[in-house]
Image (cartoon, rainbow, N blue to C red):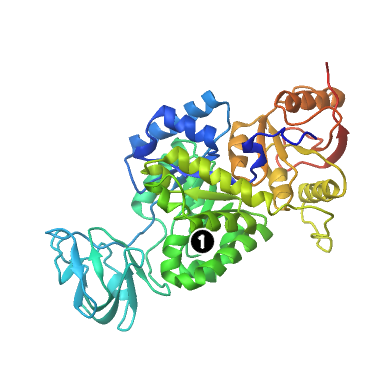
Amino acid sequence: MSANRFTEQILRRTKIIATLGPATDDPDTVEQLIRSGTDVFRLNFSHGEADDQRTRVKLVRDAATRAGKHIGILGDLQGPKIRIRRFKDGPVMLAEGQEFTLDTELDGDSGDGTQVGVAYEHLVRDVKAGDLLLLDDGHLSMRVESVKGSRIKCTVEVGGELSNRKGINLHGGGLSAPALTEKDKEDIKLAAELEIDYMAVSFVSNAEDIEYARKLLRDAGGYGHLVAKIERSEAITNLESIIDVSDAVMVARGDLGVEVGYAALTSLQKRIIKTTRVRHKVVITATQMMESMIHNQVPTRAEVSDVANAVMDGTDAVMLSAETAVGEHPVKAVATMAEVCVGAEKHHLISGRTSKRLNERFQVIDEAIAMSVMYTAAHMDINAIVALTESGSTALWMSRMRSDIPIYAFTRHKVTRRRVTLYRGVYPVHFDVTHGDSERLHQDMFDKLLGLHQIDEGDLLVFTQGDLKGIAGGTNAMKILRVTSDH
């Protein structure tokens, strides 16, 4: 196997999500982002109108065609972010020890240095004297002194500048806002219309939140997979049940860090990544991963370490938010993140034989086949793994076992090709089986990979398929093949 055969994108197993925004509203920029390493684009439904999202989806799909890449799209619902309203004369400065009131009935534009409105009427029933409220992602904090009618009287503990529409969190969690707002329900219909591949549900508290969102998406005709954003304390309590009903999980470190405290965040991130992978689901690590690159062309050393540690912990994907949506150097941010991912993977290589899951019982046939493939690949000189797949499930099972061997998801379905762009170490290939001749099938497969410069003649690869083509979840066979050329 030639040492320099693979391109950077193939060498990099960890996937990159880039958020779309004003800085990317240009066809050339989107294409450059794809060529720099973006695997999935994120639509942030918190910003922009429906037509803005339609335009951005078209930009991505057109740019992917020009670049010859399969690219996924993730729609991120706004959720019930609890925010203050607005100040009549601009931002105010709050000093430690001063009194400040939050009022759920105050006119939306009447805030001043002593009070401000709150855009959530039930906040008064969710808090009590002694609670700690965190504003603007924890930059300011105030202790609740009393709750009377619509007014929550507080004492500022950590002061600073407070401006319009900043978020409010309750330390330790417990706010009762439902996961889906009326705006979210409309955006779910839009996600279905746009054929979004993944839909992220914000501020999930329990499994029922995901099941309800999935029903709404399916009722609207959408087929996207569901991503649970873990950013509430309640989600940590219900973590396993949330993972079980989700297709993927996002470690949303902004609000989660505010609710649980930053000292606990790192260990929680590691726990979420490990638990999600053990339960055979996809995990994304997000928020402020390269925040300084909004303005700078190089990341801080701390940001490099942050990304690298997430990669070494086994995250499937790392996500850029403002860095690409509004940043000054979106393409550079993606290229830099790709470089950091590759560096972390090189220093965390998986080698040698494995005894992973030897004492477990498999529940389904394609899971057993997938684990047999990975065990075989770890004990032989295998250069590539090819999964002939309808839904992508076999490739997902394989990717849950850490390996340096590339997994190619051969599929005729564009939905599946876009879906697997989020799976760590899995690469989609357009492949349509039009005949039942196994020898011809194998040669077509070899020719496809040889043409893409992903294997050499004489290499060994492991191949999986199902007897009944066109049936999702029907993988039941594994073969070890030596690559031959048709020329």
Residue at x 67%, y 42% (from the top left corner):
426
The x, y position of residue 144, in whole percent, is 28, 80
| 7, 102: nearer the viewer | 7
- Residue at image point 81% right, 62% down: 360
Q: In which quarter of the image is residue 437?
A: top right
**Left or right of 445, for residue 427:** left
Q: Quadrant for residue 58, please give it.
A: top left
Q: Is residue 80 above or below residue 176?
A: above
Q: Position of residue 404 (x, y in %)?
A: 73, 47
Q: Name the amino acid type tagged 1.
A: Glu
From this viewpoint, which residue is outermost toward the top?
Answer: 487
Give me the residue at 80% from left, 35% from top. Answer: 1
**Rendered location of residue 201, percent (x, y):** 46, 54
> In the shown orientation, is residue 129 left or right of residue 393?
left
Say which quadrant the C terminus sits in: top right
Q: Residue at x 58, y 55 (%)?
A: 308
Q: Is 103 on the left or on the right of 364, as rendered? A: left
**Image x and y of residue 386, in percent:** 76, 37
Judging by the rendered image, the residue that carries numbered circle 1 is 208
Query: Is any part of residue 215 visible from this angle?
Result: no
